[in-house]
Amino acid sequence: MRELTRHTKHYLPLVGIFATGFFGFVYFSYDRLFQGSIIISVAVAYVVWGIVHHALHKDLYLEVVIEYVLVAALCVLAVFSVLFRV
């Protein structure tokens, strides 16, 4: 818990990214294509945030980048499979 409170200024932008993405996704519920664009934008922002966060803490490794990319891709795939089901 101490790590979380010590790095609050790092996690607030991440919360902002997810909150903005959520509200944009809900607000544009009538346009599935735009919702897809929002999901991709949030995923890219998540990966960029992770890279910047770990670079600032000097623990950025290829494995960390791959992990962020895979988590983002899995989330995009999950949302797209529900959003664009036929």
Image (cartoon, rainbow, N blue to C red):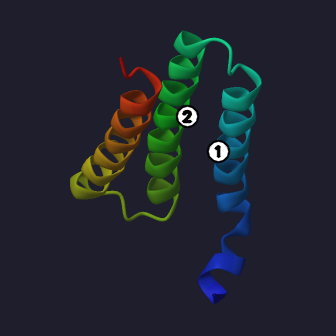
Above or below — where is 86 with respect to 10? above
- Front in this rendered view, residue 85 or 16: 85
Above or below — where is 21 with respect to 16? above
| Amino acid type at image mark 1 | Phe
| Dot 1 and dot 2 residues touching (CB under 8 Å) | yes
* Residue at 47% over, 26% down: 83
| Amino acid type at image mark 2 | Val
Report, in whole angstroms, how far the alpha carbon at label 1 lies from the one at label 2.
Answer: 7 Å
Question: Disc 2 designates what residue?
Answer: 42
- Front in this rendered view, residue 4 or 54: 4
Which disc, if any, is residue 18?
1
Above or below — where is 44 with respect to 53? above
Image location (x, y in percent) of residue 82: 42, 32
Q: Residues within 10 Å of mark 1 (few under 14, many from 20)?
A: some
Toward which corner of the image does residue 7 lie, by quadrant? bottom right
Label 2's element? helix
Label 1's element? helix
* Residue at 40% over, 34% down: 76
- Front in this rendered view, residue 26 or 54: 26
Which disc, if any, is residue 46?
none
Image location (x, y in percent) of residue 60: 35, 57
The residue sitting at the front extreme is 86
Where does the C terminus fall, quadrant-wise?
top left
- Front in this rendered view, residue 84 or 14: 84
* Residue at 66% over, 59% down: 10
Above or below — where is 67 with respect to 22? below
Image location (x, y in percent) of residue 59: 37, 65
Image location (x, y in percent) of residue 45: 54, 36
* Residue at 64% over, 45% down: 18
The residue sitting at the bottom extreme is 2
Mark closest to the chain's N terminus, 1 or 2: 1
